[in-house]
Amino acid sequence: MDVTAAAIQFTVQQGDLAANLAYLRQALPRAAERGAQLVVLPEMWSTGFAYKALNELAQQTAGVVAELQELSARHRLVIIGSQPEPAGDGRVYNTAHVVDNGCLVTNYRKLHLFSLLGEDRAFRGGDGWCLAETSLGKIGVIICYDLRFPELSRRLALEGARVICVPAQWPKPRQEHWRTLLRARAIENQLYVVAANACGQIGKLDFFGMSMVIDPQGEVLADAGERPGEITAPLSWEAMDAWRAQIPCFNDRRPELY
C-alpha cells in the first residue's frame, strides 16, 4: 500500500482559535490537491500555549474537533494534530485527535511534559500510548517532547505502527536535536516519521519549522524549511517491509537482557 503523507507548518497564533482555524481551512485543501491522505498538524495548533486562557480555550476544542471531522470527510483525509482538552482538575491535557474520513478514531494525551517551560504546572500528563487503527494502517502518535523518550516510539513500533506522527512546537536553537531525533526514531524502528512543527515567532519563542517526512532508512523525503506551507511525500509499506527483511533488527533483538 502506498500513502501520501503531508505536514502543515504555520505560525500558530496564541489564543486566536479563529485565525488558526482560518489558516487550516485554506491549507487542508491545498494538501489534498497534492494527493495527501494523511495530514499532520503542529502541536497545540488551534490555540498555542496561551497559558492564561487555556482552560477557557479547552472548552471550545470539542467544536473544533467536529469541524476537523467535517473537513476530514470532505477531503478524505486522516488528520492528526493536538489541542487543549479539559482535564477536570484546573489543568488541561495536550491531546492529539486522530480523525479518519469524518470519524474520530482515538486520541492521545501527551505523556511527557516539558517542565523547563512549566508545562507540568498547566497540563496534566496522559497515562497511555496511542496506536491508531486507521484506513491507512496502524499509526503511532507522539507529541513534541515525547520524541526525546525512545522507549515510547519503540513500543509503538513493536505494536505494529507503520508510521509515527509527531505534532510539535519545537523552538530554536534546538533544531539539530529535532532533525537528529526524528531520523533516529525512523532508523531504529525502521518505519516512517511524519512531523509537523510550528514556525515563526510565537510569544517569546522563535520556531524554526523544519517539518519533515522521513523514511525507514532515515532519508528525509521532504523538509518544509522555515516558512509556512505544506509538504508531501509518498510512504510505501512494501518498501518498508523489504527494508525490514533486509536488515532484520526486530528479529535480532534480545529484550530478555535489557
Image: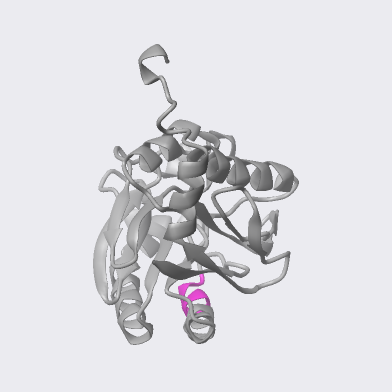
The quadrant the C terminus occupies is top left
Number of callouts: 0
Where residue 50 sits in the image (x, y, percent)?
Answer: 51, 58
Judge whether residue 167 can be spotted in this image. no
Residue in the picture at 47% in, 78% down = 21
User: Image height check: is 122 above or below 253?
Assistant: below
Residue in the picture at 61% in, 70% down = 10
| 61 left or right, relative to 177 | left
When asked about the image quadrant of residue 254, the answer is: top left
Q: Main secondary structure of the magenta part?
A: helix
Magenta range is: 16-21
Where residue 62 sits in the image (x, y, percent)?
Answer: 28, 68
Where residue 133 sits in the image (x, y, percent)?
Answer: 27, 57
Judge whether residue 9 can be spotted in this image. yes
**Residue pushed farthest top?**
257
Residue in the picture at 44% in, 68% down = 2
User: Image height check: is 117 above or below 56?
Assistant: above
